[in-house]
């Protein structure tokens, strides 16, 4: 999918890997550590994520006003995925690539919300299901399977509309984003790349 923005569009850049590396990003480990490194590809400097029986995420705290910039844009490339696992169960809750948005609950931690946009191993594109570990997290399959392995894919989602559809609330702000390549539950391995993460007004 090719993305075009008008000169009037407002954008909030979240990943300038060429100029900033991983400045502003922090890692959270769930089980071992996925190897996140900045590498040079034909498209420039990108984030490489290599996971082998591990699960850690890179996250950035950033408050986004979805009234002004509701669209989340990113590009990703998957080299290896995990095949025929059950992503709807805890022992198959692994993805070669995912990006997600988070709304903190503050002291009301049970009110936290998250949407994970995933490159699914086998669920059909457009499928939506609750995360196996959290009722407050929804999984949305943006890409699936082997059809586009080894190809850069550019995506765009209206986060505010997705939040409204999934949680029945008109939520104006998100508090952070994350990327994650994880293989700990299925004990497999995956290799993926990420670039061009930003929010936009159109």
Image (cartoon, helix red, strand yellow):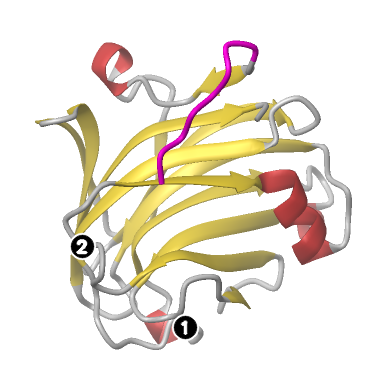
Tell me the residue at 56%/67% (across/down): 139
Range covered by the magenta-colored residues: 1-8
The secondary structure that most of the magenta stretch takes on is loop
Of 124 and 135, nearer the camera is 124
Q: Left of 25 or right of it: where is 156? A: right
**Percent from the top left, x then y, of residue 116?**
54, 58
Q: Residues within 10 Å of mark 2 (few under 14, many from 20)?
A: some
Q: Are marks 2 and 1 in contact (CB under 8 Å)?
A: no
- CA–CA distance between discs 2 and 1? 25 Å
Tell me the residue at 56%/66% (across/down): 140
Q: In this rendering, is residue 74 above or below 64?
A: below
* Mark found first going from the N terminus, 2 or 1: 1
Q: Is residue 24 magenta?
A: no
Of 69 and 177, nearer the camera is 69
**Quarter holding residue 52:** bottom left
Image quarter of the C terminus: top right
Tell me the residue at 70%/73% (across/down): 135
Of 64 and 151, nearer the camera is 151
Q: In this rendering, is residue 22 above or below 100?
A: above
Label of residue 6 in the image: none
Disc 1 designates what residue? 90
Disc 2 designates what residue? 149
Q: In this rendering, is residue 60 above or below 155?
A: above
How many discs mark residues in the rendered view? 2
Q: Label 1: state its secondary structure.
A: helix
**Quarter holding residue 146:** bottom left
Q: Label 2: state its secondary structure.
A: loop
**Percent from the top left, x then y, of residue 144?**
37, 71
**Percent from the top left, x then y, of residue 175?**
67, 36
> Furthest-right residue in view?
169
């Amino acid at each position: 999918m090719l993305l075009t923005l008008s000169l009037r569009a407002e954008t909030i850049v979240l990943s300038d890997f060429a100029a900033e590396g991983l400045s502003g990003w922090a890692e959270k480990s769930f089980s071992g550590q996925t190897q996140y490194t900045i590498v040079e590809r034909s498209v420039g400097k990108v984030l490489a994520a290599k996971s082998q029986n591990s699960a850690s995420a890179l996250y950035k705290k950033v408050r986004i006003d979805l009234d002004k910039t509701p669209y989340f844009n990113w590009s990703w490339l998957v080299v290896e995925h995990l095949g025929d696992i059950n992503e709807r169960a805890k022992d198959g809750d692994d993805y070669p690539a995912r990006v997600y948005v988070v709304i903190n609950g503050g002291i009301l931690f049970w009110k936290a919300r998250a949407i994970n946009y995933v490159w699914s191993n086998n669920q059909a594109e457009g499928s939506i299901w609750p995360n196996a570990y959290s009722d407050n997290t929804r999984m949305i399959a943006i890409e699936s399977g082997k059809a586009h392995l080894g190809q850069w894919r550019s995506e765009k989602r209206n986060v505010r509309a997705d939040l409204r559809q999934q949680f029945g609330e008109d939520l104006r702000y998100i508090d952070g984003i994350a990327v994650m390549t994880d293989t700990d539950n299925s004990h497999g391995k995956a290799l993926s790349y990420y670039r061009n993460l930003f929010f936009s007004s159109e």
